[in-house]
Amino acid sequence: MKIKFLGTGGAFEPTYGNSAAILEINQQNILIDAGFTIYPKLVQLDFWKIDYILLTHLHNDHCGSLANILLHSCFYANGRKLVILYQTETFRDQIKSFLNIQLKDVEKYAEFKPTTEIPGLFYLDTFNRHSEGFQTFSFIFEEAGERLVYSGDLRDCNFLFNHLSTLPSLPTQVYHDISFDSTNKGHAFYTDLIPYQAQFNILGYHCDPTQKPADNTIPLVYDQPDLRY
Ligand SMILES: [Zn+2]
Ligand SMILES: [Zn+2]
């Protein structure tokens, strides 16, 4: 398993790109999230070896350029429909309604398959734990005796870590959204993540790295050049 981020910023930090990543698992590339800076980033990299798209939620910094990415793949890249993986049928229908407004008939440009298509991909329903009444998900990937966790946007990091504690022990890398602003109620505040460092390797993303306070001990994806495009 290999992950490389296309952006590590928050919703209002386009300088760092919208948080999104390419995860390689079973020799296939999954694009995790497709915010409004991601299409230009893929064009800049000329990276179209995308097999699947997986969305944590439908906020614009996570799906804002999805329609463009689908169209580009059909018309300019390799002429094929990308596969959008869906966690639940309700979420699939939400993605479809969102895209149908933009694309008229989304089935012309994308295929939809359940996440069970990918062995070793699991999701955690984090509804209401990022934004009130809003559907969000975290992802857990397992391959070759390793586990990789992608929080998505999640205020309630205790929920995710409590779940991880119930799983069989495996070397685990957790990528968690992080906030350095205590008034931000949408993301995990860094002091809430720090206690879990005793048990888990954690890297933070979805932030402005220049706002990192001196007492923060969570390393940031932004500061790891190997983890970023
Ligand atoms: Zn976000
Ligand atoms: Zn969000």
Image (cartoon, helix red, strand yellow):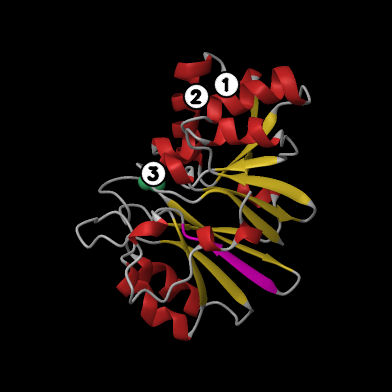
Q: Are marks 1 and 2 in contact (CB under 8 Å)?
A: yes
The residue lying toward the viewer, choosing from 72 and 110, is 72
Report the amino acid beneath label 2.
Leu
State the residue position of label 3: 13
Q: Point out which mark residue 74 bears.
A: none
State the residue position of label 1: 106
Task: Tell me which residue sits at (44%, 49%) in the image.
Answer: 9
The boundaries of the magenta stretch are: 146-151
Report the amino acid beneath label 3.
Glu
Q: Is residue 99 magenta?
A: no
Of label 3 and label 2, which has the lower sequence position? 3
Report the amino acid beneath label 1.
Val
Q: Position of residue 131 (x, y in %)?
A: 29, 49
Task: Tell me which residue sits at (65%, 30%) in the image.
Answer: 43
Q: Is residue 182 above or below residue 57?
A: below
Q: Point out which mark residue 99 bears.
A: 2
